[in-house]
Amino acid sequence: MRNKFFLLVAILFGSLSWSGCISFKRGPAEALATAHKMKAFDAVIVPGIPFKNGHWDSVMKARVMWSFILYKNGMVKNIIYSGSAVYSPFKEAKIMGLYAQKLGIPKAHIFYDTLARHSTENIYYSYLLAQKLGFKSLALATDPVQSFFLRGFTRRRFASPIYHLPFVMDSVRAYAGYNPEINPSSAKVDQFEALTSQEGFFRRFKGTLGKDIDWAKYNDKRLAPL
């Protein structure tokens, strides 16, 4: 069932791309060009991806590399890595932070949300953390597909804008040969149970849509400004 869902998403996204609604190359490049003209963001949110087989996969690598590129170029001041131990016994946020430190991002500029189990929650909990830390401007750094599907959510649910900065493939590709080694033990959790064992497909899908968040406690069902 899970594979069927992702196949459906892939078909939908492929159709949108083919019809010209989305451009993998033009959209991210234009967003980056616009961001270059803006003040540096106080923080950028980077959603997690499962850590399996003892090393990062291509998606995690691209997201972490992109956050490093943004930090190195002075476009973001801090990075919030987000993700709990969802499908593997490692907190995704902590794993990304370990790789980020290997790339040269100082620990003092790395923050963690380890509660999120879905992409919508990555943004929700990171926004709450940003409020707590006093950050006033936020961006979202992820792949173009996830960025597209989260655009409506970030616009509806948060009073402060969250600027989308999907990664530019040419920039990320320049680091293709770089694969630092980390010790993941500090990110491992005990007594792990995968989300697929805890919840059925449709229950998880509701979580993906942000239905696990109690929006009723917020005015107009959206979070207050940063």
Image: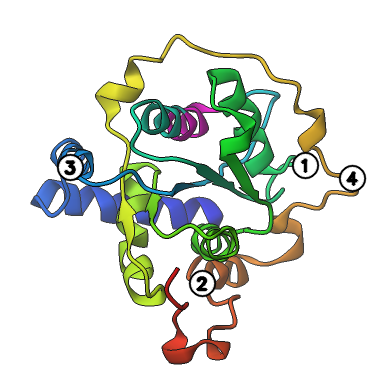
Q: Earlier in the sequence, mark 1 or mark 2?
A: 1
32 over 3 or under it: above or below: above
Label 4 sits on a secondary structure element that is: loop
Q: Are marks 4 and 1 in contact (CB under 8 Å)?
A: no
Q: Tag on residue 89?
A: 1
Nearer mark to the viewer, of 2 and 3: 3
Q: Is residue 117 left or right of residue 210?
A: right
The residue range painted magenta reads 57-64
Q: Quadrant of residue 142?
A: top left
Task: Identify the residue position indicated by label 4 in the image.
Answer: 190
What is the spatial separation of the Cα atoms under label 2 and label 3, in whole angstroms? Answer: 32 Å
What residue do we see at 31% from left, 62% from top? 151
202 over 125 or under it: above or below: below
What is the spatial separation of the Cα atoms under label 2 and label 4, in whole angstroms? Answer: 27 Å
Amino acid of disc 1: Pro
Q: Tag on residue 37?
A: 3
Q: Is residue 150 left or right of residue 110?
A: left
* Mark 1, other Cα within 10 Å: few <14 / some 14–19 / many ≥20: some
Residue 32 sits inside the magenta stretch: no
